[in-house]
Image (cartoon, rainbow, N blue to C red):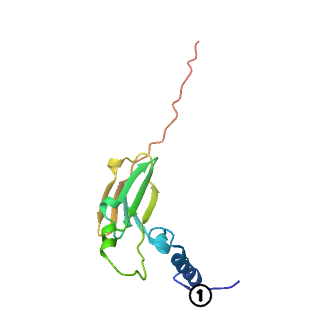
Amino acid sequence: MLYMPSIFGEDLMDRWLNDVDREFSRMEKPLYGHNAKNLMKTDVREHDDGYEVDIELPGFHKDEVQLSLENGYLNITAAKGLDKDEKDKKTGKIIRQERYTGTLSRSFYVGEDITEEDIKAKLEHGILSLQIPKKDSKPQLPEKKYISIEG
């Protein structure tokens, strides 16, 4: 087995090949390219009455983030695009570009008893803060039906 040198868990040869591929193919890359897997870092804290979730979304604005609730799953989607006006204003040959357009998403199971009104969200300084209450799930007990006995 051949071992390649690595820095921070990334194989240097793979990194170099990815750079070469990017230059030759000019294919659309996912948001923030090779490092997309490191985004949407999340901290979850449990309190007596609920959960506090902090998600890193640096550089995103409120209108670029969407929250939805479906079948007990809280879905967070963040979409980023480079501003066309910004691109047109700047002249010169781009030597290296690390900003990409694309979409990130992540889902968390919060339970089917939680509604959209229960969840409080705030985006400040690149951190999306969510307050999700705990709701006691009431187990459905089967209703027992009895047959009366005559006699």
Q: Is residue 150 above or below residue 24?
A: above
Which residue sits furthest top? Answer: 151
Answer with the quarter of the image where residue 18 lies.
Answer: bottom right
- Is 38 displayed left or right of 67 in the figure? right
Answer with the quarter of the image where residue 131 lies.
Answer: bottom left
Q: Is residue 90 above or below residue 143?
A: below
Residue 151, percent from left and from top? 59, 12
Q: Out of 150 and 142, give the one closest to the viewer.
A: 142
Residue 38, percent from left and from top? 46, 72
Residue 143, percent from left and from top? 51, 31
Quadrant for the N terminus in the image: bottom right
Residue designated by label 1: 5
Count the marks.
1
Answer with the quarter of the image where residue 40 lies.
Answer: bottom left
From this viewpoint, is residue 35 visible? yes
- Is 133 displayed left or right of 145 in the figure? left
Q: What's the residue type where badge 1 is placed?
A: Pro
Query: What residue appears at the point 41 percent right and 45 percent down from the top-left corner?
Result: 113
Query: What residue appears at the point 52 percent right and 80 percent down from the top-left corner?
Result: 19
Q: In what element is the residue under mark 1? A: loop
Q: Out of 118 and 121, give the one closest to the viewer.
A: 121
